[in-house]
Image (cartoon, grey):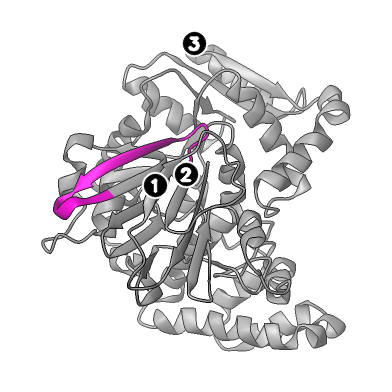
Amino acid sequence: MFFFLNHRCASDAPAVQVRVLDAPNLTAPAPQVLYISPGVQRLETLELPGGRRLLLLGDPVFGDRDRTAGRVTDWHGELNLTALFSEVRGHYYWFLLQDNAFRCGSSFGAIFPIYHQTRDGHTRLSSRSFFLATQTDPGRLDRRNLLERLLFNYPLFGTTWWSGISLLGTHRWLTLSAEGAKEERAFGLENYFGHGFHSSREALDQLTEVFEDECRLFLPDEPFAISFTGGFDGRTLVAAARKTGRVDFITYSFGMPGESDVTFPAAQAEQLGIRYWPIKLDPDYVHDHALKSALAFVQLSEYNGNFGRAHYHYAAQALAQKKNYILTGNFGSELFRAMHQPGVMMTEALIRVFESPDASWKDYLRQSVGRQAAAFFRTEMDALIADLERFLRARSDMDRNQQFYCFVLEEIFRKYFGPELVMQSHLLRNRTPYLSLRFSRH
């Protein structure tokens, strides 16, 4: 899956045209043309009022496709992100085409990244930062991006490998017109936090019903595979699929022979009478596939992944030979259990930002990188701290736990899980029912 647009911000610039490519082999892109290569994903087109078109690139999951076009606009006829996220689940890019402007963004959670740069009257944007860097002057390598990776294992906010290329923020859209490029916040998670009073069995039953309804929508019309490690997330997805009466799926997990990640689901699948396929990370995998998959994971994730997740590429490659769709429990555990334990997803540095009762987290960030690094990254550290302060200040009417989960949904999910799903999007379609606006706000 790939897209690229070179937009000239001028009053005499023609409207954006769309050209669909069989492969992302683009050597001399023309301005005002949105080049799209779906790959193993798909491109959907919705006709909106006023002659506008909404393109969805990826794996959009519709509640009622025939009525979607009439439900994703507000009473002014403008695109409404809350309505779009409610009506169209899944992971996708969206593009709004109209005569005098172009607008784009990503689905709920913004797992698929949009990279952009405005320079010399042109705004260039793409799904691939490295391709974008070949089309313009990307600027110097960004030291702040490196600092954030050292502190948190992934970059934060809009930084990329280059100082001149930015990442579109979560739940924002980018509008391109004769006046230039404008990034706007169009959806706020803070509007969906409840008061926490619903803790009865009745409320739990309602949540269960909502999740079952959402899972039913996420099940594809063709045979599929479900990630089944034997844990809570996988068991729930298997139960939801079985409750709909579907039997045309296989379950899978990966691990070393004899590990619980393989033996537990194998035993459970046998008891349930469902098909199970172990993807074995055995010596043959280590000697013949691990390095190639590690390199592929890093390259396909725009170098945002790492060698430690080579098995995700190996598994996706194997699964793609059998199925076009997988359902995974990504985001499930993180929504249901406390995330305040340090690890690869949540470093101690990030925990301090949200748990410190005062401003001591700033000193911790400076000290945790060491004296020499702190001096080297002094300017970048000051800018990072200022952005974290800005994030907290914008949500000052929320308690720290709510602020933290805003950060989880807006930053951590896309930065930690994003490389995995971006890599998989080259091979198959990963549907993640837990990341649903309707389910999350319940």
- Mark earlier in primary sequence (3, 2): 2
Measure how far apart labels 2 and 1 are at the Cα level: 7 Å
- Mark earlier in primary sequence (3, 1): 1
Residue visible at 49% across and 70% down? 122
Q: Which residue is mark 3?
A: 273
Residue visible at 46% across and 56% down? 110
Q: Is residue 410 a member of the stretch shown in magenta?
A: no
Mark 1 neighbour class, 10 Å CA radius: few under 14, some 14 to 19, many 20 or more: some
Measure how far apart labels 3 and 2 are at the Cα level: 42 Å
Q: Element under label 3? A: loop
Q: Element under label 2? A: strand
Q: Amino acid at mark 2?
A: Ile
Q: Which residue is mark 1?
A: 18
Give the percent coordinates (x, y) of residue 353: 59, 77
Query: Of circles 2 and 1, which is in front?
Result: 1
User: Compared to 379, does 204 lie above or below?
Assistant: above
Mark 2 neighbour class, 10 Å CA radius: few under 14, some 14 to 19, many 20 or more: many
User: Compared to 57, does 289 lie above or below?
Assistant: above
Give the percent coordinates (x, y) of residue 324: 50, 24
Kindly check if marks 2 and 1 are in contact, taking CB atoms under 8 A apart as contact.
Answer: yes
Q: Which residue is mark 2?
A: 36
Q: Amino acid at mark 1?
A: Val
Write down the quadrant of residue 340 in the picture: bottom right
Residue closer to the observer: 258 or 380 = 380
Q: Which residues are magenta?
A: 36-53
